[in-house]
Amino acid sequence: MRNKFVLTFLVVYTSLSFAETIWTDGFEDGNISDWTITGTANWALYDNEFQAHTVDFSLQYNYQSPWPHDTRAITPEFTLPEADEFDFTWWWSGSYIYFVQVDNGDAFTEVRDVNGGNWIVLWSENDAGTYTGFEWYEQTETLDASWSGKTVQFAFHIIASDAHYWYIDDIELGYTSNPLDHITWGRIKTGI
């Protein structure tokens, strides 16, 4: 009977996972001073409820000349905890005509290990396929457990010439882990 209880306990708890939020930014504090802007610096906080996913503010890429643009809006640094996986979620809105049909620009989301890593593309607007310009879309990219313990940054990267506006809003970085990964009974640590 005891073995049946332990087996039931393990089956139930191995199917559970904990989701935790590391960071969110919806830009509603009216401040992007903890972000780093590189390159042609065409990013700004935009205060217009019609170009925000929620409430009033979003992060806006401005396509104004001089061109070409190669610019990143880079998040603060985060040291990731031990976890099974990490989800980076954001909402985006942009011009399908200028970025895809006319192909005057490319929008990417990237990640890097700040201790020596290069930028790795997680997503491109081409991955979205056909979309409606200036509608809001949610995107989530997942990093596996190999990112545990690393200090990372994420970036929204635009390479463009006359490509029109691009908006980012409601960003969240979170992680999930199996509760048994973090339980120790006496000298035995679980390993499922």
Image (cartoon, rainbow, N blue to C red):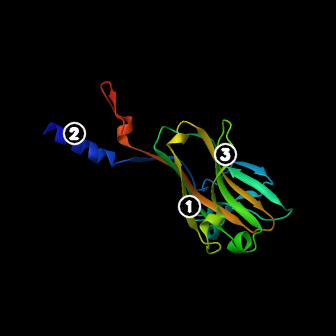
The amino acid type of the residue labelled 1 equals Gln
x then y, percent, for residue 107: 69, 61
| The N terminus: image quadrant | top left
Question: Which residue corresponds to the image point at 50% horizontal and 38% vertical from the top-left?
Answer: 81
Q: Which of pointers 2 and 3 indicates the residue nearer the eye?
A: 2
Question: What is the spatial separation of the Cα atoms under label 2 and label 3, in whole angstroms?
Answer: 48 Å
- Mark 1 or 2, nearer chain start: 2
Q: Extreme right residue here?
A: 66
x then y, percent, for residue 128: 60, 67
> In the picture provided, is 147 more to the left or to the right than 30?
left
Q: Extreme top residue here?
A: 187
- Mark 2 or 3, nearer chain start: 2
Q: Mark 1: which secondary structure? A: strand
The amino acid type of the residue labelled 3 equals Asp
x then y, percent, for residue 97: 71, 75
The amino acid type of the residue labelled 2 equals Val
Q: Is residue 3 above or below residue 133?
A: above
Q: Which residue is mark 3?
A: 34
Q: Mark 2: which secondary structure? A: helix
Q: Which residue is mark 2?
A: 6
Question: Which residue corresponds to the image point at 65% horizontal and 74% vertical from the top-left?
Answer: 133
Question: What is the spatial separation of the Cα atoms under label 1 and label 2, in whole angstroms?
Answer: 39 Å
**How many residues crowd mark 3 within 10 Å: few (<14), some (14–19), many (20+)?**
few
Question: Depth check: 166 or 8 in front?
Answer: 8
Q: Is residue 31 above or below residue 190?
A: below
